[in-house]
Amino acid sequence: MRQLCPALLLSLLSLCVFPPCAAASASAAADYHEQLVLRPLPLSALLASFNFRSNTTVSEFESGNFRFFPRSLGQILQHAGTRELHLRFSLGRWDAESWGSRPWDGAREGGTGVELWAWLDADTDQEADHKWLTLTNALSGLFCASLNFIDGTRTTRPVMSFEPEGDHPNTSAHSMQLLYGVLPHEVVCTENLTPFLKLLPCKGKAGIATLLDGHKLFDASFQSMAIDIRPVCPPGGECVLQIEQTIDMVLDIDRSKRPRDNPIPRSLGGHELLCDTSKPYHSHDTCFPADQDANQDWSLSQIFGKSMKGTCPLADPTVPPVCLQVPESRAVYTIDGAVEIKSRDSRCFQISPESDLELLLPPPGDEAQDGAAADILPPGTPPLYAERSFTGYGQERGGVQTILRNPSPDTEVEFVYMESLPWFMRIYLHTMEARIAGHPAPSPDNHPLIQQVYYRPALDRARGTQLEVRMRIPPAATVFLTYDFEKSILRYTEYPPDANRGFDVAAAVITILDPQRNGSGRFAAYTIRTTSLLCSLPTPDFSMPYNVIIFTSTAVALAFGGMFNIMVRRFVAADEGSEGGLGALRGKLLGRLGAVAGRFKGNQ
């Protein structure tokens, strides 16, 4: 198998001394599967969703037989008493207006920076805080991130926003505590991708993980890495511990197709420009750029820099490794040996473990009747659009405004809006207001917009502000949620080196509730993260200490130099210096040398 995952292959081959080895290996392979889903988006974008999932029985996990579960992460969970874990590394912004609905309904997406929330097995708050500190420090070293900076000021305990995704039949609600921490200023880079790949059974040496390259991933317009660990108890079966690793990235097709030896984009010549000839002002010397959303052609090697190297031998062979979501009329070419599984709006491809996979998507031909509409699938409409920004002016006070728009013409949306604010943003809860655009009353039809509010005020340098608001928006309505806050003045030692840049404020988490949650037990139907904010605080003039140091050093140098000259330098008259001159100094030196020489001869 071309030296793929040698340690794991040897361990599997060593079991084949018995006849039932084939059945055992088949059942073991079914416990791990991976899949890549490619979906072209408007504005010359491509969504690539990598999903890796493995299962390990709880009994094997507790006995130390981790199988496909990474041992390094499993030992951390055991030591910290973690029942369920969710970790996010995200960069960029999902453009819902252009790209439509989020992948995985937003469940695998995080805000800018790093997000972590977990359910810990603890009876008291002090025990939960101690285990939370242990967990964040261990994960910080494992993923090469600054998770150890998630202290009490960046940790909250959500009440209405999160619910466990896994099954916890033998655990009471009182013995599980939820803690949530966020680092909006964390820069996600290749140092976080490498530990992510090491958690996979094939370590990125085979399968779809070979397409994950740091140069391509972190050049994307939007990217999110997610790790979810939860117990799953199927009906009538044994409970398993499931780890799911997901990477979603939106690639710019034109930028991704640029060769490695030409990393700097250069403007095209006049003869290479694609002009829109339908414009009335088009002429030989006037060019209006044409819409390049349609007729985009690309291949795997162009987008990811290389083709897929085989398949992971431990993955479930019944799951196609690569699926492409394009219209049924769109032509797709691949190499010989790949088996295509065709459906209405999806093409999946199966290959042998030893062969490579290369996909080529040419521009649509004459069968595309309506141009760009036949190039890609129409993006879905999200249940809610959200925008958040600062209001006001000055360095003392400000405000936050969130615009929430319900695109459905006949269905209302109920959701929980949560913000985790730093302690130096002291909000005024009595100023919080929700109003519908164009309606002076709080809400029409006597249905209040705000149904429930949970507010935990901040303590200076101890904890941040926690605000959770449960709201309901009527169909086809736009709601403005606003409140005012006051900015605190920090100590000069609390300012970072780039103090004039501002302080990052974590993204708000919007959890849209499932309208049929009472019957199905499902809590969240869709999750949205708003963009992070940049708060400008009153910043002192840090050049003044520099000026004081310069003036003080100059004064000390002048005083010390003068005193040193007075104490050390010997002053003589001008005539004494010219009369003695160098001859007197030479005579003194010769006399001293003669005395030393005479003493040396006398001793001999």
Image (cartoon, rainbow, N blue to C red):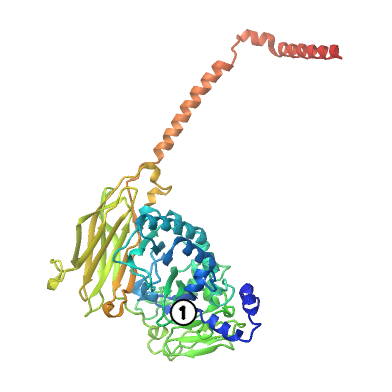
Q: From the viewer's perspective, is residue 332 above or below residue 262? A: below
Q: Nearer the viewer, residue 357 or 209?
A: 209
User: Can residue 139 be seen?
Assistant: yes
The local secondary structure at tag 1 comes to strand
User: Can residue 503 be seen?
Assistant: no
State which quarter of the image contains the C terminus.
top right
Q: Is residue 379 left or right of residue 77?
A: left
Residue 500 percent across, percent down from the top left = 38, 49
Residue 319 percent across, percent down from the top left = 50, 84
What residue appears at the point 53 percent right and 64 percent down from the top-left corner?
72
Q: From the viewer's perspective, is residue 370 above or below residue 403? A: below
Which residue is identified by label 1?
38
What residue appears at the point 32 percent right and 49 percent down from the top-left corner?
537
Residue 241 percent across, percent down from the top left = 46, 73
The image quarter containing residue 484 is bottom left
Looking at the rendered structure, the kind of residue marked 1 is Leu
Disc 1: CA contacts within 10 A as few (<14), some (14-19) or many (>=20): many
The image quarter containing residue 24 is bottom right
State which quarter of the image contains the N terminus.
bottom right
What residue appears at the point 54 percent right and 71 percent down from the top-left corner?
65
